[in-house]
Image: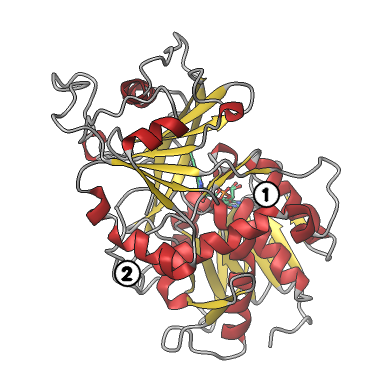
Amino acid sequence: MLKQNLIDCDVIIIGAGVIGASVALALSRRGLKTLNVDTLPAAGYGSTSASSAVVRPFYAALEACALAHESRHHWTCWPEFLDATDERGYAEYTECGMMVLLAEGDEARLGANFEAMDEVGVAYSRLTPDQVLERLPGLNMGSFGPPKLPDDPAFGIANPRPLAGGLFIPQAGYVSDPQLAAHNLQRAAEAHGAEFRFNTRIDAIMRANGRVTGLTTEAGQTLEAPVVVNVAGPHSSKINAMAGIEDDMRTTTRPLRHEVAHVPAPGSFRLDRGACVLADGDAGVYLRPEVGGHMLIGTLDPECDGQDIVDADDYNPELTEQWTRQVWRTAQRFPELAIPNTAQGVVGLYDLSDDWMPIYDRSSLDGFYMAIGTSGNQFKNAPMIGPLMAALIVACEDGQDHDREPVQFVLPHLGRAIDLGFFSRLREAHSEGSGTVLA
Ligand SMILES: Cc1cc2nc3c(=O)[nH]c(=O)nc-3n(C[C@H](O)[C@H](O)[C@H](O)COP(=O)(O)OP(=O)(O)OC[C@H]3O[C@@H](n4cnc5c(N)ncnc54)[C@H](O)[C@@H]3O)c2cc1C
């Protein structure tokens, strides 16, 4: 068992985004002394702050669906989950539901998603095109897929057959303020003795005799601990390189640049008129309503766009052509959308893994763990990733050979176990997903 006889603390967590703060809370609830170190000035200022924060159980893999559905439960009672006060108030979860638009053939292609939801007990209903329109009036139910670039002569020309209908999942929604959610987790962790150190960049990982021993900061300070967790978001591969642990990893990570457009919502797509999260694979976008009559438009990374893989310390922070593509694709679906002259929105980085699934695992270096590769879709799981990582770390430190005998993690609300081998760095890429952020 991890002991509390250490020089600086029991566990150092690199990163204080929503996942790093969740890991701190879960470990400190177990009585361990944690220290989060982050380059930025406050919790959740990294990729977390750009998040669309959509919460949905729509995944092709059973483990991913179960983890998301469990986590949704904790968002519904967030203050109780935290069991601590925050002078800034609490992030709020809005359960507006999620609509997945289905083109011809999608029903069969998404078979694994239906199976996973059935197995986990997620409620959903299949809707005809007319029923979709009852819920979301103003939609053009034409089919335009596969998504194209706006300068493609076929852009905006509808296919002969319209969309086949939709799938509605009532227990889905979004969190109002992802950065505040990270701050909430920080405050809850601090109530258990956790420490957070900001404006501090890690530039080396120390090791001795096959085990991590701590790290050094850019300012030259040494911090010692027997356990270090890489939760550095889009910088995860840089931290792994410092630790020298990439050789045995079959799944690796890299930063993928993403833009999310913020535009005035068409009149029919407002929260007070029943707007919900919308996944539109046919147009290649996802949308969600925002208070104040706005909506967010993210991309589902259609093949024609390519991937904008960047250096996490050197990338274009401005909105570009990507913004225009997303807004134009949305205008196919919402003919009444007014396209603003001035682009507004956010630029953020996904920490992309090979199969769009995260890596929650130990590493080849004893004592060095990773909660990385969140691939634009793990904000929703923040309440449970902390407890999951805590279970994994404690089991490994107690001597369990997780690579051979994976830890089984019990989801407390659903009362079912998931095999954490699913998230292993040693896995062959999972093939059941869509190869997009929907995973
Ligand atoms: C545009 C966008 C939209 C998204 N939409 C959704 C969504 O709708 N639903 C969903 O579930 N998920 C979504 N996600 C994904 C989700 O937001 C992320 O998975 C999650 O926020 C990652 O949190 P994190 O704590 O791992 O990383 P981060 O928030 O990036 O935190 C990592 C921290 O590590 C720090 N760090 C890095 N290197 C160092 C170093 N050397 N020394 C010290 N500190 C360091 C950084 O400063 C940073 O604060 C989206 C992500 C983006 C970018």
Horizontal placement of 150 versus 264: left or right? Answer: left
Direction from residue 134 to residue 90 in the image, left or right: right
- Name the residue nearer the viewer: 215 or 25: 25
Residue 9's place in the image compared with 297, above or below, is: below
Quick check: is the Cβ at mark 1 less than 8 Å away from ligand 1? yes
Here the colouring is secondary structure
Q: Quadrant of residue 327?
A: top left
Looking at the rendered structure, the secondary structure element under dot 1 is: loop
Q: Is residue 182 above or below residue 154?
A: below
Taking 209 as reference, is 52 above or below it? above
Task: Classify residue 37 by image quadrant.
Answer: bottom right
Instruction: Write the residue at 43% across / 12% down.
Output: 338
Q: Which residue is mark 2?
A: 250
Q: The disc labelled 1 sits on which kind of residue?
A: Thr
- What separation in Å lies between label 1 and label 2 (alpha carbons)? 30 Å
Q: Is residue 8 visible?
A: no
Which residue carries the number 1 mark?
200
Q: Residue furthest top?
A: 341
Q: Quadrant of the N terminus?
A: bottom right
**Residue 373 in the image, given as x and y percentages of width and height:** 44, 57
Residue lying at 46% horizontally and 16% vertically, measured from the top left: 343
Dot 2 amino acid type: Arg
Place of residue 375 in the rendered image (x, y in percent of width and height, measured from the top left): 43, 52
Q: Position of residue 348 (x, y in %)?
A: 49, 37
State the residue in front, 356 or 93.
93
Q: Earlier in the sequence, mark 1 or mark 2?
A: 1
- Quadrant location of the C terminus? bottom left
Residue 6 placed where, x, y %?
Answer: 76, 78
Badge 2 crowding class, 10 Å Cα cut-off, few under 14, some 14 to 19, many 20 or more, is few
